[in-house]
Image: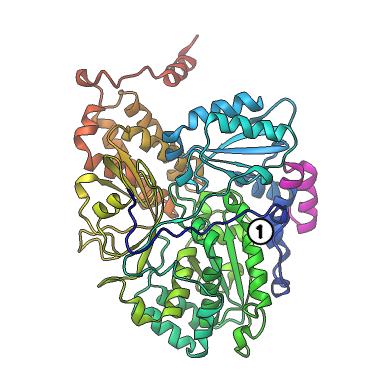
Amino acid sequence: MIFIIGQQPLHLHFVLPVNRLFMSSPIRPHFFSDEPARSRLLSQLWDYQLRDRYISPEAIRTLAEEHHLSEIEVEGVASFYHFFHQEPAGKHTIYINNSIISELKGYERIRETFERETGARLGTTDPSGMFGLYKTPCIGLSDHEPAALIDFYPFTNLNALKVKDIIHKLKQGLLPEEICDAPDDHIRFTPAENHTIFFAPYERGAALRKLHELSPDGVIENLRISELAGRGGAFFPTWKKWNTCRNYKDTTKYIICNADEGEPGTFKDRVLLSNQPGSVFEGMIIAGYTVGAAYGIIYLRGEYRWLAGKLQQEIEAFREAGLLGTNISGINGFDFDIRLEIGAGAYVCGEETAMLESMEGKRGEPRTKWFYPVEKGYLQHPTVVNNVETFGAVARLIQMGTFEYLKRGIPGSPGTKLISISGDCMYPGLYEIEWGMTIAELLEHCGAENPYYIQVSGPSGESVSIKEKFRRISMLDLMAQKDIRCGGSFMIFNKSRDIVHILRNYSSFFKHESCGVCTPCRAGNFIIQRKLDRLEHGLADMDDLKELREWSRILKTTSRCGLGKTATNAIIQSIEKFPDYFKTRLAGIDNSMYRKFDEEAAITEYERYKP
């Protein structure tokens, strides 16, 4: 049974380069020679981590001297990021994904097998120092779970036999890049009547040639008429952001592509960058032309480091074709270039100001919003920040024309949307849909298996009951419509799944990923997880639910960034939408089947009061 409407599945295969191009610092072209030295700190830390498998005290000392910083400050930067270790992390460093989709697909069996075959306990290296074994949140492979990264190469659809074979080969001296299996990034679904936008045939430079007919004002007008909104989840009108940046007078401006999609369950940017990085680059170049910027930077999440070689090759191809550098595409005076920056494992860096701090060689902590990036962004210069899908959409819109673009979607929500689908369904993968499709239609296309609870846009998004399946997916005002906005993913769970266990996984993720700057977020996420522990063990009462709501209100009103403000979305919405289910989870004579002995709490209580 194939759920494809309008055309055959698109199979766009990507073969990993068998080399170590991406193991060195990303190339910085001469355009970026004036950047302050500290902006290289993240790349330099990566060099030490990849060479030595940890950041040694000597490395900290060397970098501190080079950048005229204290050792404490450099260590503070290194310790902020998940992928930088201050103890040796093994000749081969293994990261197992422990997101909720991975858990439901067999994470525990995979963990046990890795521990047995490597001799390393989770969070340590084995006695020989050959293997370091660590867990990490979502690695952007939810459609291929269980999955892992070994030396930052992907290994997907794991089972015990496959893990055993992988470790055996590594012990025999084979390299991860020789035996890894890159995801088969075919597109599961595109709109009928050839209405695909993102995956239409692509010709390098086709969108840029349209700039000969369009002034910067013309680009802004096309974006305004098309109603193209940012695809990172906030849906801010793209033309307004670009026009505001364009109006600031500064000789130096930046275009930043936020490729740090760390939301569990989301992998749409991975597929787009794997299949068609050129359209993303062209969108960035068009932004540079429109706002008067000469510098473009792609902030690629560390989990996608294996894509860096391919992206760098495409950048070089653009330069050779005259589409990057000076007088781009034959337009006199239009100079623009792109470089890569690779993150190091920090979900909070998906927040645009935290990402800018990271790019400047600092801890990735969100800035206080005195200024928006369009006024004072990277290095305090006007900066446009959009995500991968937004830049890809811009390039396609300019290429096909606004009139053609408006034929897709529905009034108020024109165009198409990329959605990552995973969980309890027959056909996980990337779906391109026209705005206006109902949840029920999307569930049918992906072969959802007895869906009951759906998490839209990741743990920070909206929890949906199957009773809401006739809601449309659109960009319309949520206060006036019953439509649902989708930032980019559907995680589908059937009725056999324990909702409290799912929520506890989300809570653990937010607790781990909080930068710790805001006390309510730092302490609140810890307390929230403890409340969910009580629910999971059948020990909670109505007061616990009340306190969950109170902590949610505190986090939403006092957190500096979106992590704290949205960390409890799924919890509160689930309590509201599944009231009967939560009644069965409260302590009482009717739910003895859920009640468990809370060993951790008992030990804590004993330690507190023991003689």
List the single residue furthest toward the top.
611
Its colouring scheme is rainbow
**Above or below, comparing residue 10 to residue 166 in the picture:** below
**Residue at 65% from the left image edge and 32% from the top image edge:** 167
The answer to whether residue 343 shows anywhere in this view is no
At which x and y percent is residue 181? Answer: 59, 45
Q: Label 1: which residue?
A: 309
At which x and y percent is residue 31? Answer: 70, 75
Nearer to me, 210 or 603: 210
At which x and y percent is residue 448? Answer: 31, 44
Where, by quadrant of the figure, is residue 432 drawn?
bottom left
Left or right of residue 332: residue 100? left
**Above or below, comparing residue 497 to residue 176 in the picture:** above
Nearer to me, 64 or 414: 414
**Residue at 47% from the left image edge and 69% from the top image edge:** 392
Provide the secondary structure element on which disc 1 rests: helix
Q: What residue range appears in magenta?
A: 49-69
Nearer to me, 348 or 485: 485
Q: Main secondary structure of the magenta part?
A: helix
**Above or below, comparing residue 113 to residue 436 in the picture:** above
- Magenta stretch containing residue 57, yes or no? yes
At which x and y percent is residue 349? Answer: 53, 54
